[in-house]
Amino acid sequence: MVREVLDKLQIEYEKIDVPWPHHLRKNVREISGQTSVPVLVDGDVVLDDEYDIIDYLKTTYPILS
């Protein structure tokens, strides 16, 4: 769902695939403090909940015509 919103808002992003086993997601833990995905990093903003990410994107970035 997050990628759908990013695409709808025409926001360029980098998708990083992470290992399936949570114990191998060291980069995710370093960035967000946990191992679940998705994680959004936008400057100093780090969000790790899908619905929080979507709300943030919709309120921070206007829909382009």
Image: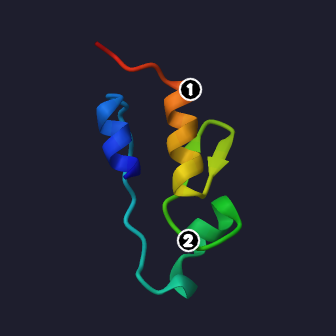
The residue identified by callout 1 is: 60
Residue 12: x, y in percent?
Answer: 35, 34
Residue 34: x, y in percent?
Answer: 66, 71
Q: Which picture quadrant has residue 19?
A: bottom left
| Kind of residue indicated by mark 1 | Thr
Crowd band around label 1 with a 10 angstrom C-alpha radius: few (<14), some (14–19), many (20+): few
> Height in image: 32 above or below 29?
above
Name the one closer to the observer, 31 or 61.
61
Report the side of 65 relative to 29 (left or right): left
> Height in image: 62 above or below 37?
above
Residue 9: x, y in percent?
Answer: 36, 29
Q: Which mark is residue 4?
A: none
Q: Which mark is residue 36?
A: 2
Name the one closer to the observer, 32 or 62.
62
**Residue that appears at 54% across and 46% down:** 53
| Kind of residue indicated by mark 2 | Ser
